[in-house]
Amino acid sequence: MFDLRTALNNHIPIDDKEATDRDAMLAFLASGAPCFDRAHWPGHFTGSALLINRDGLRVLLNHHRALNVWLQFGGHADGNADLLDVAARELVEESGFSAFEPVMDGIFDLDIHPIPYSAKRGEPAHLHYDVRFIFRLNADDERFTLSDESLDMRWCNYDEAIALTGPGSVARMLGKWRALA
């Protein structure tokens, strides 16, 4: 089973933002709060998955319906402290792929980001303590299934992905992916 505390301690941040977020995640985890429960306000842990194709040259991005932005796949832990499992579950649910494997043993990226108030869901504004993993597709067939959570999905090379996502933590994650390729 994935041990979040150990993985956070072993993760080497690439910039000051990620280092600050790692320290905040460690403190949040040690606080004793129900940090894996989506109903815990002001925030909770989430697990995300960046999926690259078999040759590692393209990434599948998700045009998230609720947020109306292009992102990696991911979602709520719903009580599951194994965030690697959460990220893999969300990848299956949101893309339809099941033939994939982690590219690395540990965490790929970390980001704490705000989620706006949602009248539709009755959720206050809160924070996602997002632990991100990178997965590689183990199949040549790159046809995905569009879920209800997505407006669109698209396989992109690095430049196309940056153009869709813009600056910020997703761009940092895409830069890490590019360095691996």
Image (tube, rainbow, N blue to C red):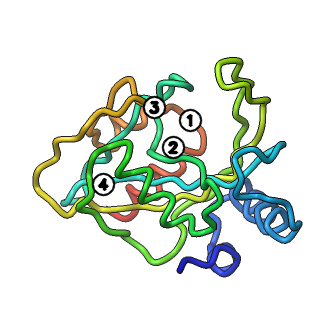
In the figure, is residue 9 to the left or right of 87? right
Which is nearer the N-term, disc 2 or disc 4? 4
57 and 28: which is toward the camera: 28
Where 2 sits versus 137, above or below?
Answer: below
The mark that comes first in sequence, 1 or 3, is: 3
Amino acid at the residue labelled 2: Ala
The image's mark for residue 52 is: 4
* Contact between labelled residues 4 and 2, with CB atoms less than 8 Å apart: no
**Which class describes the residues within 10 Å of circle 4: few (<14), some (14-19), or many (20+)?**
many
Q: Are marks 3 and 2 in contact (CB under 8 Å)?
A: no
Lower sequence index among marks 4 and 1: 4
Q: In the image, is residue 13 above or below residue 63? A: below
Q: Position of residue 115 (x, y in %)?
A: 70, 33
Residue furthest right in the image: 31
Percent position of residue 108, x then y = 51, 64
Q: Is residue 162 left or right of residue 115?
A: left
Residue 136, percent across and down? 29, 62
* Circles 1 and 2 in contact, beta carbons < 8 Å: yes
Q: Which residue is mark 3?
A: 70
Three-letter amino acid code at disc 3? Answer: Trp
Sequence-first tag of 4 and 3: 4
Q: Residue at x 72, y 27 (%)?
A: 116
Taking the spot 63% from the left edge, 72% from the top edge, the residue there is 12
In the image, which is nearer the foreground, mark 1 or mark 3?
A: 3
Label 1 secondary element: loop
Query: 128 above or below 103?
Result: above
| Tag 1 residue | 167
Q: CA distance from mark 3 to mark 2?
A: 11 Å
Q: Which residue is mark 2?
A: 171
Query: Of 39 and 171, which appears nearest the observer?
Result: 39
